[in-house]
Image (spheres, rainbow, N blue to C red):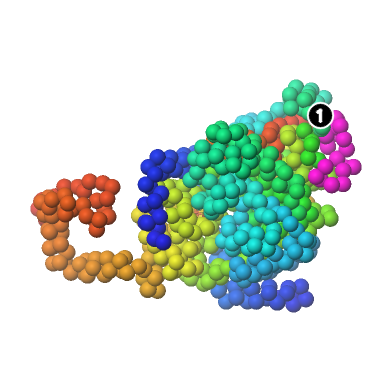
Amino acid sequence: MDHSVLARRFVSDRDRAAWHDRALWFVREKRDRQADDIPEWERLRETASAIKQHTMSRLADYLEAFARHAQARGVQVHWARDAAAHNRIVHTILKRHDVRRIVKSKSMLTEECGLNPYLEERGIVVTDTDLGERIVQLRQEAPSHIVLPAIHIRKEEVGDLFHRHLGTEAGESDPARLTEAARRHLRQEFLSADAGITGVNFAVAETGGFVVCTNEGNADLGTSLPNLHIACMGMEKLVPRTQDLAVFLRLLARSATGQPITTYSTHFHGPRPGAELHVVIVDNGRSRILQSESFRRSLNCIRCGACMNTCPVFRRSGGHSYESTVPGPIGSILAPARSPHRHHSLPFACSLCGSCTDICPVKIDLHHELYTMRSVLDQQGALSRRKKLAMTITSHILQRPWLYRTAGRLLRLGLRRLPRFLLYTPLNAWGRQREMPPGPRRAFRDLYRRQPKDR
Amino acid sequence: MTDDSILPDSARHFLERLRSAQPPATPLPELPVTGPWLTFDNAAERFQAMTEAVGGRCLFVADAAAAEAALEELPAWSRAATRCSLVANIGSSTFDPAAVDDPHELQHTDFAVLPGEFGVAENGAVWVTDEQVPHRALFFLPQHIALVIPAEQIVHNLHEAYDRLRPQDHRFGAFISGPSKTADIEQSLVIGAHGARSLTVLAVQNRF
Ligand code: SF4
């Protein structure tokens, strides 16, 4: 469905939409305070961007080095070309260990691959352990934001949900008490799980180790109790050297939630004694994006979510309106790059304001890529007929100055003279939630011409 | 470059596909340890302030006896029925974690006192490893934890931190910055999500 259609649903609940906007802006402001605290912030961003670009230019070598070092430490490394292979590999490992219950920390990759439904169909109970993810899982929805999965839900709704599922008191909406109930509930899940699944924030080529970052400690509980840990990683998560982690850990939490670092940044180098550790490396369309000169920088993304918090469209339309595991500006590049026909409306859900590009810790040229994506989608014939028609008409007019001038004159006149019922038709999307400005008498062109020339 | 004896077919196909997709080479930037990065006039002070900013407590104490006394003053410690310490001369244990085979048995631990290697001033993080800690669950499962670091072991920033540590020497190593927390319900910060409800850093001046 078009982003605009889904966004309309979201904004029809005015209070919620306004709250959502404010909550994300609050996170953005926290990020600004943290960034201002670091005088070398811009240098850090540039360094991070250069490290990632270099890594992408030698990704095969680095992945190979990573795999060798990891194997030497007793880690079992698997290679998955696509989502189906990833799910199959994970399931095969779980089956070999006769696993019934797993606890999973936040991993956008497993969301992207649809791992939960795949395992559930095969009789395995999957519990998402990040509090926000647990909330959306109990509601049987997808996360609406990659860092703040339940940002679209109000505390009263969490109260109702927990009342039904966890037996909290009816009407309880205090975040501290609700979190306490979730803590008790999830402790039992951690203690009874047969395996833990985590994502990977950064993997280090020179050591074969990887880092997982959380604030709640859920990835750590999920991997320090059961004897099986499976880490699922997108192939772009690599950095060459241990030292590089300093750059990325300094940027990640500050950009994501405005914290100086996540509470837990855990480095895994080999399995716990007596336990097994598996890493599944996933391509799933990434090598195609890597090939594209216009879009490959989108693979530098460290999934901090800052571009979502700052995006005026995301804040006002909610993550679900993107219908993509990764929503917002970066998702509007990754999703259509992978499935142009399904996600064609996303790059247009953007005013090209460039705020995302300014804030992105790895300096992805987000709004430029979004702009380029529009014409790529057009060339691929992926645009809706209406959009295509509108673009053809506009381009026809813009190419003919006389037509442009005439159209402008008619519009100015129309804005002044036409009765409301003709101006505010369903066809005029700009008049839907706002008053149109009064039509000016003169075009800018005329005003400019009348300027005294000598100055 | 591919060594068939180690890498399975799936890996070779994967890497071949990648090699044909790779963009032109760009250089890897040099990373100096010092120079461009933020440092502080008083790293200890900043570390203490940051630990508190992330919801923890940080106490600088003269020696082990003073650390012990500081611990006794913590209600979470004095109330703890099940507790253990893996730091010599600081805190007492009601059980021996090394004698525990299965980490699940640690679930009733109320308080654990654990060794940290050093602190990071810029973000209040403490580097910990599994070196003297038999179960890594001890960092996450107890209701409260205290990390003991030598007071002079505080680096300015993460660049200095990574310069001195070799994470690959340990199967497990982590930066821990404050107690477990979440803001997933309406962005209101709640301390004590899954892991420790409180985290106290004891920075000890004269270790021995
Ligand atoms: S594109 Fe940049 S700002 Fe957006 S999530 Fe990725 S790293 Fe963060």
Residue A435 appears left or right of A210: left
SS state under label 1: loop
Where, quadrant-wise, is the N terminus of chain A in this rendering?
bottom left
Is residue B88 located in the magenta-colored stretch of the structure? yes
Looking at the picture, tell me which residue is in the foreground, A123 or A270: A123
Residue plotted at (86% across, 32% down): B93
Would you say A354 lies left or right of B155 here? Answer: left
**Who's the residue at 40% across and 40% down the image?**
A15
What residue occupies the far right of the structure in this picture? Answer: B99
Q: Which span is picked out in magenta?
A: B84-105
In the picture of the structure, the residue carrying the numbered disc 1 is: B81
Please indicate whether residue A319 sits to the left or right of residue A351 in the image: right
Dot 1 falls on which chain? B
- Residue in the foreground of this view, choosing between A150 and A260: A150
User: Of A45 and B72, which appears nearest the observer?
Assistant: B72
Q: Residue at x 81, y 32 (%)?
A: B83
Could you say where residue A235 lies in the image, as x and y percent from the top left? 61, 64
Residue A11 visible at all: yes
Percent x, y for residue A431? 24, 51
Q: Position of residue A451 (x, y in %)?
A: 11, 51
Q: Amino acid at mark 1?
A: Ala
| Residue A180 inside the magenta-drawn segment | no
